[in-house]
Image (cartoon, rainbow, N blue to C red):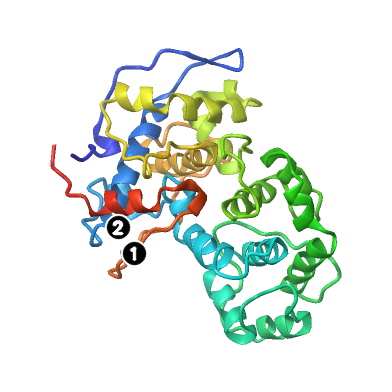
């Protein structure tokens, strides 16, 4: 059973909803949010299942979108499996590895460091050697996924400052402070205090550290709406949602089953794991992009009208999915990927 393409469906207008005591009137993009999520999740499992057919929706087929679940994206999968759980599990080592990876957010950069320096541990870390390895790199060191501003710590090159910042955070006892944290909001506050880490990056880093064995907080504890999510929320609800974006994200997570059912959609949850706050936040970013083509007349905050990244289908099979062991969903997701899909 597969879901209809998001652009092909028409539904009755959605009644006004109340969030944080404020009345919001959903636009047509609100239903597109749920249809996009169902279709994008179908595409994820199709890729896992023997690199299955491309999406039938022309926007999904032509443009690049992240997965519904943040942890299922390629870079997150690498961060979880190879970085977070791929070396010594002493908290200081785990935190240092994850910070070091996230400052560049690029798999090739991490592989270069490990190829030249060996398994990254805090005790064996050689700052001068690491700087020299990255100085000599022949590829871009940073992912284009989002901007990682320089912390401006006096280094001659941006990556020197990021290496120094990761080292400084460990010297400051961040790993030990994280173990004493009382929730994701506390983790966020600890990270936000460092130069170069604004609200968006501090939240993203909090989620990545929470994937590891060092932390174990619910992803429904705390959320920060990034610029893309704010654009998506504006398209779904208009200016009335300004200032209550976090509450809107919480509403989406809390009511997801009701809206999928209302639209007659089958949403294949990730091994039985519901969409959490970070996933709903990311979906607002993606529906903002999707709506630039599907709903070009609906305004956003940024005013962007094009989707920059094109989708180029890779014929290589996707690696077997692997999620934090504490979630207990890896085998269930693999079973879902192997299941036979019965057309509706």
Badge 2 crowding class, 10 Å Cα cut-off, few under 14, some 14 to 19, many 20 or more, is many
Q: Secondary structure at mark 1?
A: loop
- Quadrant in the picture for residue 83: bottom right
Q: Give above or below for 314 relative to 145.
A: below
Q: Give above or below for 178 relative to 80.
A: above
Q: State the CA–CA distance, disc 1 to disc 2.
A: 6 Å
Relative to 211, 72 lies left or right: left
- Report x, y in % for residue 18: 53, 14
The answer to whether residue 176 is seen in the rendering is yes
Q: Which sits in the foreground, 210 or 13?
A: 210
Q: Which residue is mark 2?
A: 48
Q: Total of numbered circles in the picture?
A: 2
> Which label belongs to residue 22?
none
Q: Which sits in the foreground, 136 or 169?
A: 169
> Which label belongs to residue 318?
1
- Quadrant in the picture for residue 12: top left
- Report x, y in % for residue 122: 73, 72
């Amino acid at each position: 059973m597969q879901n209809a393409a998001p652009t092909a469906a028409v539904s009755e207008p959605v009644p006004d909803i109340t969030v944080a005591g404020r009345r919001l009137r959903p636009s047509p993009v609100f239903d597109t949010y749920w249809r996009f999520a169902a279709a994008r999740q179908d595409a994820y499992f199709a890729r896992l299942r023997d690199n299955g057919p491309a999406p039938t929706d022309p926007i999904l087929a032509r443009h690049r979108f992240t997965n519904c679940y943040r942890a299922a994206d390629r870079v997150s999968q690498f961060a979880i499996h190879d970085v977070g759980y791929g070396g010594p599990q002493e908290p200081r080592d785990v935190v240092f590895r994850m910070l070091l990876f996230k400052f560049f957010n690029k798999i090739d950069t991490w592989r270069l460091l490990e190829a030249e320096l060996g398994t990254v541990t805090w005790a064996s870390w050689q700052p001068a050697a690491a700087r020299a390895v990255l100085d000599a790199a022949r590829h871009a060191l940073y992912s284009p996924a989002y901007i990682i501003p320089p912390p401006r710590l006096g280094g001659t090159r941006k990556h020197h400052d990021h290496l120094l910042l990761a080292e400084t955070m460990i010297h400051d006892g961040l790993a030990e402070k994280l173990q004493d944290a009382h929730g994701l909001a506390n983790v966020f506050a600890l990270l936000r205090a460092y130069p170069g880490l604004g609200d968006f990056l501090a939240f993203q880093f909090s989620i990545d550290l929470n994937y590891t064995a060092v932390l174990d907080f619910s992803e429904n504890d705390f959320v920060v709406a990034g610029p893309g999510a704010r654009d998506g929320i504006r398209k779904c609800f208009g200016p009335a949602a300004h200032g209550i974006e976090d509450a809107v994200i919480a509403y989406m997570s809390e009511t997801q089953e009701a809206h999928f059912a209302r639209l007659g959609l089958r949403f294949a949850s990730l091994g039985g794991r519901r969409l959490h706050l970070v996933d709903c936040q990311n979906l607002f970013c993606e529906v903002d992009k999707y709506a630039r083509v599907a709903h070009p007349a609906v305004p956003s905050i940024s005013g962007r009208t094009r989707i920059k990244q094109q989708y180029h289908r890779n014929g290589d099979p996707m690696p077997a999915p692997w999620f934090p062991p504490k979630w207990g969903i890896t085998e269930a997701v693999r079973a879902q990927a192997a299941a036979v899909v019965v057309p509706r």
